[in-house]
Each structure stands twice: as structure tokens, then as C-alpha cells.
Image (cartoon, coloured by chain):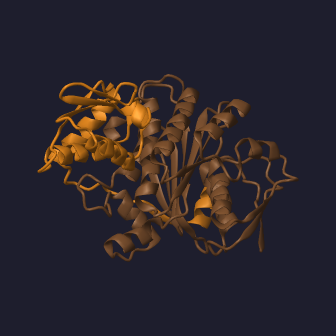
Chain colours: A orange, B brown
Amino acid sequence: METNKNQNSTTIKVSELLAPIINSRDVVDVLEDKIKKTDTESVVLDFSNVKFISRSAAHALALLKERIESRASNRKSLSFINANNDVIEMLRIVAANKIYPKNKKPEFNPEKIDISSLLKEVAA
Amino acid sequence: MKNIVIPKPNNESLISQLGSLYNVFKGVNFGEKLEFDLSLLNWVIPLLVLPISAYINETQSKFKIDKCSIKGYLEKISFPNGVSSISSFQRQIQKYKTFIPISVLKKEEKVGRERLESILEEKIYETLGNVSGARSAVWYSISELITNIFEHSKKDSGFIFVQLYPQKGYLDICIVDCGRGFAKTYEEEKGLKLSDEDAISEVMKGNSVKKDTDRGYGVRTSKDVVCKALKGGGFILISGSCALVSIGEREKLASLPNFYWQGVIIAYRIPKPTGSVDYLRYVI
């Protein structure tokens, strides 16, 4: 069962609705559609059996939580349960970056070369 | 139709394979129908075989493998069409055990794609062994690089192929799309006219085409996870006529004259982890 409803709350099992590894940003849309169809004020995302979430999907999930909880109508509370340490860490990294984003851009100073010279270097 | 004889790679290094790939597509007008002749090959790695598969799928080009000594291997990995469903992936895995087929991920099949990717990632994990942090480090790079295809390429499908070399103690992964490439993405989304070299540099500096904050980290952090967290891995990224080659701490941007890949090719090598992997410090 993907969802389980009691009096005021609907629980959605993320691994059953989506997959045990949440890779892509756009699958969060599937979760959003499911949440919008619930008729309770509280929705709980159950992460049991979810082994990993990508940073992109975690970011999309954080934005989804903001949208769901700040809507003018049909506002709901969205909470997460049973997440493993990897999932929790990724959600925390995303949350921390949203509140306190890094200002310094990473440096990138590669050596420039043409393919022939690169291949000669390897062959030498 | 132009006939392209795929040359035998000189050695197994990622850079040597980049050289072979360059020689295959040098002088090709991306999109033209070709006939690939694989007769000379007696081994391949993902960086060579996956872009050829993607190109065949994209352009309905032809291929010859009848006289090829690795014909059996190519059939086991579902060359060139790959598999795009969970059932066909599992059938291939059951039939050929250690050979992971080329997988084609479809944009519109969100949940189906996610589940196929999950099964593929679980299969990779089986081959890595139970090393703390290694599982998530490998999954992180794959998930971020694949989600990029569907976020930016404007293409409905992406390709991934993974090959484990147990004797050599490493894993090769290649991810390919035939979409817009970085330079065209910056032009169409932000109005910036950049060379392929500058577009790759913008990606590596984390300058996203998206307006949201906290975007633009996927490629850069994946490269760092591969090269730094997974110690000793190598990472190659090709877009248009330029390649980024990162081996350990060394980074080179190589121009690829008379070559153009419409889209992005990413190939990386991960040595089988032996100690715990702290990937999170490279993700922040």
C-alpha cells in the first residue's frame, strides 16, 4: 500500500510510490500530485526502505515542502519519518544551503591542451 | 553512407579511450547516418561503446559485428539498442549474470525510469562490496549526472552503461545524451554565447542556467566525489568540441578539432573502494 490514512493524516510510503533510490528531481512531481489528492491536513512521507536520495531530489523535496505548507488554500503540513542516515544527511545539506548559501564560487583553472598533445603525453 | 572502422584502442586508460572515441567521430557531421564496423575490436570500454550505441539509436545508423571477436560480449550488453524496461533488464541480468546491459532511460516514464535506475544502482552496489560510504558515493554521481540529462538536455532519453573489471579492480561508468550540450544550453536559457570550452568552465564553476539558488552543483560535485572521495578515479566530460579530463587533482581542458558531439558524454573510472569513503564533504 502506497498510502495509509487515519483521522487527520495521510502517510505515503515513498519507496512504494517511487523507488528505493530517489535519483531524479522530476519524480518529486509524482509525489506532489499524490499529496495534492489527499484530503487530510497533514501528510507524512515515510522513507522506510528508501536507501538513498540524490541532492537534486532532496532539493526538489525541500521546495515541495515549502510550497505545500505555504499555500493560501488547501494548505497542509508535510513531515518526514523513517529516513536513514544517508537520506537525513542529504536533506540537512540542502536545508543548510537554502538558509545559508555558499557565496564563494568554486575555482576552476584547468590546463588547456589539444587532444593530440594530450594523447602524446599519455603515450610517452 | 560513410563507413567507420572502429580502431582498436591502444590501451585501457580513459585517455586512450578518449583518443579512440575522437578518432571514431572525427570528421563526422553529427546526425549523419554512418555504418560502424566493429570487426577490429577485441575489447571495449564504456567510453567507446556507449557513445556509438547512442549515436546508432539517435541516427538509425548501421553497424557490423559479424566478424567481431567480441560479438558475444556485445550481445550480452544489448549493444546497440540497450534495454529500457525493468523486465528486460532483469531478464538480461538473469541470463548473463555479471554483464550489466546498456540501459536507456526515458524521460516520460518517471517512476519506471526511477525504478530501472534503482535496480541498476543496486546491481552496481553488489559489485563494490560493503565499504562504508562507497555505496552512496557511487549512487550520488550516477543520480546527479542522470538527472542533469532530463533537466537540461531537452532530450527524452539518456544512456548509461556500467562495466566492472574484477581482475583489474575498477568500475567504468559512462552516461551519454544526444541533447543540446552545455554551450547551447547557456545560449538558449541565458542568452550567453559561449565556446564549448567556456561552457564547460561555467558548469565547473557551478553557474547554473536555473534561477533557483542552490543549483549548478551536480556535475562539479560528482566529479569531485569520483576523483577525490573515491580516491584515484578518473573523470572525462565531453560537450561539443571540448573534453574535460580530470585524473586525481590534475585537470585539463582538451580541444577536439574537427569533432562535435551534440550533447554530453561523461565517463569515469572508480577503483574498487578498500577503505571508508567520506563523500559528503565534497557534496556540500
Report x, y in % for residue B81. 68, 53
Q: Dividing the image into 4 quarters, which one contains the N terminus of chain B?
A: bottom right
Name of the residue lying farthest toward the right: B67
Report whether residue B278 is seen: no
The answer to whether residue B9 is above or below residue B93 is below
The answer to whether residue B262 is above or below residue B41 is below
Image point (65%, 60%), residue name: B57
Report whether residue B216 is seen: yes
Image point (53%, 56%), residue name: B157
Asked whether B139 or A75 is in front, the reply is: A75
Report x, y in % for residue A24. 40, 46
Name the quadrant containing residue A118.
bottom right
Image point (62%, 37%), residue name: B87
Q: Dividing the image into 4 quarters, which one contains the C terminus of chain B?
A: top left
Report x, y in % for residue B34. 73, 69
Name the quadrant containing residue A91.
top left
Name of the residue lying farthest toward the left: A72
Tell me: B205 left or right of B141: left
Tell me: B136 left or right of A37: right
Image point (42%, 24%), residue name: B132
* Circle count: 0
Report x, y in % for residue A50. 39, 29
Tell me: B267 left or right of B280: right
Tell me: B142 left or right of A61: right
Asked whether B190 or B239 is in front, the reply is: B190
Asked whether B251 or B133 is in front, the reply is: B133
Asked whether A99 or A81 is in front, the reply is: A81
